[in-house]
Image: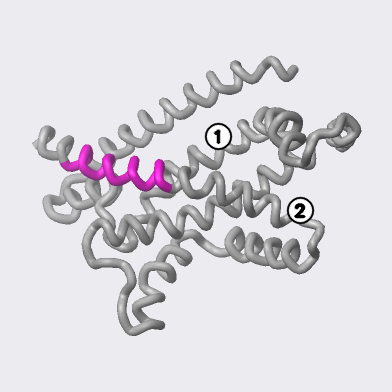
Amino acid sequence: MFWEVTQSLMGGMATTFQIFILTLVFALPLGLIFAFASISKWKPLRYLMQVVVWVIRGTPLMLQLIIIFYGPGLWLGHNIWSGNEAGRVSATVVAFAINYACYFSVIFRGGIEGVPAGQREAGQVLGMTKPQIFFKITLLQMVKRVVPPMSNEIITLVKDTSLARIIAAYELTFAGYSFMKSDGLTWPLFYTGVFYLVFVGILTLLFNYIERRLDYFR
């Protein structure tokens, strides 16, 4: 039974890891775009972005996931997501990417605004273009400032992947819960927690290493 549970959890872990990686791949650059939009000098874009971020951050991720997965089928008369596992994972990634992009945008905006304006002005005096100022002056200092809060959000993402179970995506928590539902066993749930702890532990060590590598900014 232990080996059977382990195999099932490994299968769920593969889906959890897939959701985690794909969410970061899309949410990180999207969050940077949202950050630029939220500090844009064009007021309509800035206000629109602030409203979007407010709505996404102010409503539960579970609710957003349900709307994104079931909404198109109710509104359009057909579901744009296939009924198989791939469709459920795709809907989960879309919901998670939008949600976390909004959170990341606030962190990125704080990191950008935390860089002294005088440094950007100095770059302009030296004849640097805006992209050069951003990549050579602002970005490197921003990374140091955003790593600690970003690490917290990314670790939270690991645990939030369990919400995919609400649309029947076969992730880690779903795999562990299935044994309690079918066989009345509770220990697989505790065993499931071990998988999450290992995953989070690895990420914690990784972010601690990154922070040590960025000590040259001190």
Q: Residue 187 or 112: which is nearer the viewer?
A: 112
Q: Percent from the top left, x then y, of residue 92?
A: 38, 57
Residue beneath the point at 36% across and 36% down: 196
> Hey, what amino acid is under mark 1?
Ser
In magenta stretch: residue 93: no
Using the image, tell me which numbered label, if any, was put on residue 39: 2
Q: Are marks 2 and 1 in contact (CB under 8 Å)?
A: no
Which residue, given by chain and number where applicable, does mark 1 sit on? 151
**Does residue 73 appear to the left or right of 94 in the view shown?**
left
Callout 2 amino acid: Ile
Question: In the visual, does 137 lie left or right of 16?
Answer: right
Q: Residues within 10 Å of mark 1 (few under 14, many from 20)?
A: some
Tell me the residue at 17%/35% (across/down): 6
Question: On the rendered image, what quadrant is the N terminus found in?
Answer: top left
Secondary-structure class at tag 2: loop
Q: Position of residue 114 (x, y in %)?
A: 79, 37
Q: CA distance from mark 2 to mark 1?
A: 23 Å
Q: Residue 12 in magenta?
A: yes
> Which residue is at the front of the view, 39 or 165?
39
In the rendering, at what x and y percent does residue 43 appear? Answer: 80, 65
Q: Is residue 34 left or right of residue 119?
A: left
Find residue 75 and name its label: none
Identify the mark nearer the N-term, 2 or 1: 2
Look at the image and give the residue range highlighted in magenta: 8-22
Q: Secondary structure at mark 1?
A: helix
Residue shown at 31% from the left, 34% from the top: 195
Residue 102 sits in quarter = bottom right
Apparent side of residue 184 relative to residue 63 in the rendered image (left or right): left
